[in-house]
Image (cartoon, rainbow, N blue to C red):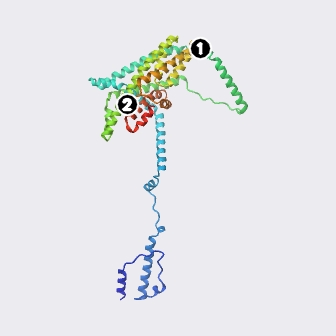
Amino acid sequence: MGGVDDKAEAAQPRSVPDATTIAAPSADELQYGESGPHSRRGRAIRNWFTHLRESAQRLPFTTPPAEPTPESVAEGDDSPGLVHIRSYSLFFLALLGLFYTLYFAREILFPFSLAMVLCLLLRPPVRWMAKRGVPYFVGAAVMELIFVAVVLFGLYQLVQPAGAWMTNAPAHLSRIEAKLRPITDSLQNIKAATAKVDAITDGDDSDGAVPVVAKQPGVASVVMTSTGAVLGSVAVTLVLLYFLLASGDTYLNRIVEMVPTFRGKRDAVEVARAIESGVSSYLFTITVINACLGVVEGLAMWALGVPNPALWGLMAAILNYIPFLGPLIGTVIVGLVALAEFETIGAAAVVPLVYLGITTLEGNFITPSIFGRSMSLNPVMVIIGLVFWGWIWGIGGALLAVPFLAAAKIACDRLERLQPLGRFLGG
């Protein structure tokens, strides 16, 4: 009967009790059983340990927490605030890395950037010659030779009178100093009074220390180093310019091949064509305007009796490539020249006023009327671009600031998502 009872008991479904309902077997169950003390005792002990183990596995504190994985951590940290902070931090670090690269790699990046801008200026005539059967490499050589000849002619016209004026520079500087002596004497008195006040308040804290003056490199060494660097940059620029012009549309086709979608290919071609057309048109037009400005400034200097009027007219044409800052620099230079050449300060003051008036008329009325709204740029962004690129690459960077800004505006106007930025750049 015991065996039958055991089978019937095993066949009945048995719910696993909870840990709070499990009781240890009593002494009677352990000592006595229906079919014998030993079989009953062993079954009771086994059942009790089995129930206890199954119940303990369901308790929360018995299962150790799983080790955090990178996926779980990333999923748990995806709150909007943390995502935005992480994105802004990465963007800021990338921006700092870009500035660092632009500054310390300027010997490489500036010639390449200048060659790209000159390529945009000279590519339309090269393409025009290619449509009439002239190979690209021949058209590129012709246009680059014409460009180099024009630059050398301008430098020759600039260097000869500039060298003559620099020869008499000591005499000019002495006359300027004599006319500005009242102002300089007042500044010296203020400086001496400030030094006395500092000596009284600070006391004598020298303690017998000997000042150490670092020896600066000589003028000849600086000139030779600068000349070598300039000639190297010019050579790299001319070589890059020739290969960019001679390649035709090869690089554009390679870029289009890397774009996966047809719409992306079409947008890439449209943006590239628009930048080429817009920037080349802007550079050609501004060059013509600056040349006319130089002629007018030279005639005005000649009419006012300023020596070497061609020099100051050519200087005005070159400096006008730098908006706002260029005309101011030219005004200061012609003002100093007028102080050295004219007897009275009143007569000398007329020269910079005329110079500034002509450049103001050109910058505020003539150029905007020619370009219209299509190439109008935000003056604040122009000044920021001049300061930034001038800090990064010096005078060359200031010359490239406006073409860079114009190219960015054209690209933003062509891309739908960036059109608000294009309107901001255009004022």
Q: Secondary structure at mark 2?
A: helix
Left or right side of 10 for 309: right
> For the C terminus, which image quadrant?
top left
Left or right side of 291 for 125: left
> For the N terminus, which image quadrant?
bottom left
Where residue 112 sits in the image (x, y, percent)? 41, 30
Vertical arrangement, residue 427 with respect to residue 50, above or below: above
Vertical arrangement, residue 349 with respect to residue 196, above or below: above
Q: Residue furthest left?
A: 133
Report which residue position mark 1 lands on.
346
- Numbered badge on residue 363: none
Dot 1 amino acid type: Gly
Tell me what residue is drawn at x 42 percent, y 37 percent.
Answer: 420
- Figure quadrant of residue 242: top left
Report which residue position mark 2 lands on.
275
Give neighbour class at mark 2: few <14, some 14-19, many 20+ (Cα, 10 Å): many
Tell me what residue is drawn at x 46 percent, y 72 percent.
Answer: 56
